[in-house]
Image (cartoon, rainbow, N blue to C red):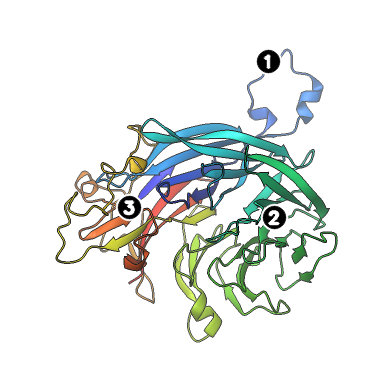
Amino acid sequence: MQAVDTEHTVDSVEWCPLPGCRHLLACGTYQLRKPEDRPADRESQSELDVDEPPIRLGRLYLYSCNEDSSPCPLVEVQRRDTSAILDMKWCHVPVAGHPLLGVADASGSIELLRLVPSEDTWTLQPCSRLALEKQCLALSLDWSTGKAGRASDQPLKIISSDSKGQLHLLKISEAGPGLQAVVTWQAHRFEAWVAAFNYWQTEVVYSGGDDGLLKGWDTRTPGTAAFSSRRHSMGVCSIQSSPHRENVLATGSYDEHVLLWDTRSLWRPLAEVPVRGGVWRLKWHPFHRDLLLAACMHGGFTIINYQTAAEEEQEAVSLSYPLPNSLVYGIDWSWLYFCRLPQTQPSFPGSDPEVRTADQDPALKVADLSPAPSSECLAYSDGVGRTTHQDGSKLEAPLQPSAEDKKDVRLPTSGIKICDSDQDLEAADFDINLLATCSFYNHVLHLWKWENI
């Protein structure tokens, strides 16, 4: 549907999960700038400058997904220069009345940014920052609120991992909000690429490292691993607990395999799904309990069906979509979903008080700003540009649009409304999905519409 040039190399993309803000998409970049790339006064340059380490620069973008008939749905509403961003996650519950975005960056810090309304749009404002360790990179983070619902007495926590192989458990003071270190421990010999909560038992966390190990930990006794697995043959890069099934865990590795586990029996995986490329990110669909999205680096991205993988009766990969000359690091499902309107119901704006449009709902309005530089809108095509897969699913492929094509690119379609809250879930059509991916070296953020038909 759209391709946006992020200028810097890009590695992280996250849709906001909170109702009323689900049209918002955060995107993080990681740009390595070597000393020789920096402007310098040759006469004043000393010999010490030659050995100066590279600078890791970053930029945080905030986009709004426009619900009107614009040919370019994603509109940039904010950009913020930072240290290079390695990972980002939204908290799934509001904190002190605001959505919170957690960012892990190359300075070795975790930063919290509060989403606040600003005139007709939204902005992210820093509210807390905590340095994990000196001379390290914060590589990942996860919130303890990865599934719907949280007991009132359950503390809000973050688990993070770093380039020294350590894990860091943090506690959130919700009044501020503020970050407080709880405990740090050595988990892996090399980089701890990922750390993640068991969303159903938040005392339990999992970690994956460049040593090829997948480990489980009880944070009440963090010094000793509860289990350790070498089932992956290379570095473990991605882990996510299912928000829909209590005992299901997905892991991915440089070994180009996604493993699905029953956390009650971690001596062997439930299923092993080969994919084309190292698996840097895994994301369960927010509503469809069987769909798992994988960022497969040079292999593009893949959608896996958990049910078929567990039954081992048919091909588990619903879609595998390569992106030539790209390195896909970031992926995420949109929390916006489509609802089909009843046939007898007029589909014009205002006919149904539940139909939310950009004009009717202030939360969905977008500032009148131009898209990011070199933003490119991509049209649909019924032949050359459409990829059809064995199960019949279709993904709109990026094509250079003609001026005539651009008129037909729409986010909504006839007889469908886009829903931003959970009240219409029973009428949702999960055969139509929005997702975002970001490709590292060619610095492109893609917005896709996937029709699973």
Residue 250 visible in the current orientation: yes
Query: Residue 138 falls in which quadrant of the image?
Result: top right
Location of residue 200 (image quadrant): bottom right
Q: Is residue 222 left or right of residue 324?
A: right
Q: Earlier in the sequence, mark 1 or mark 3?
A: 1
The residue at which mark 3 appears reads as: 399
Q: Nearer the viewer, residue 423 or 239?
A: 423
Question: Quadrant of the image for the C terminus?
Answer: bottom left
Residue sitting nearer the eye, 201 or 287: 201
Callout 1 amino acid: Asp
Q: Is residue 388 above or below residue 349?
A: below
Residue topped by disc 2 = 193
Q: Amino acid at mark 2?
A: Trp
Q: Residue at x 58, y 33 (%)?
A: 126
Is residue 213 in sight in this rendering? no
Q: Which residue is mark 1?
A: 41
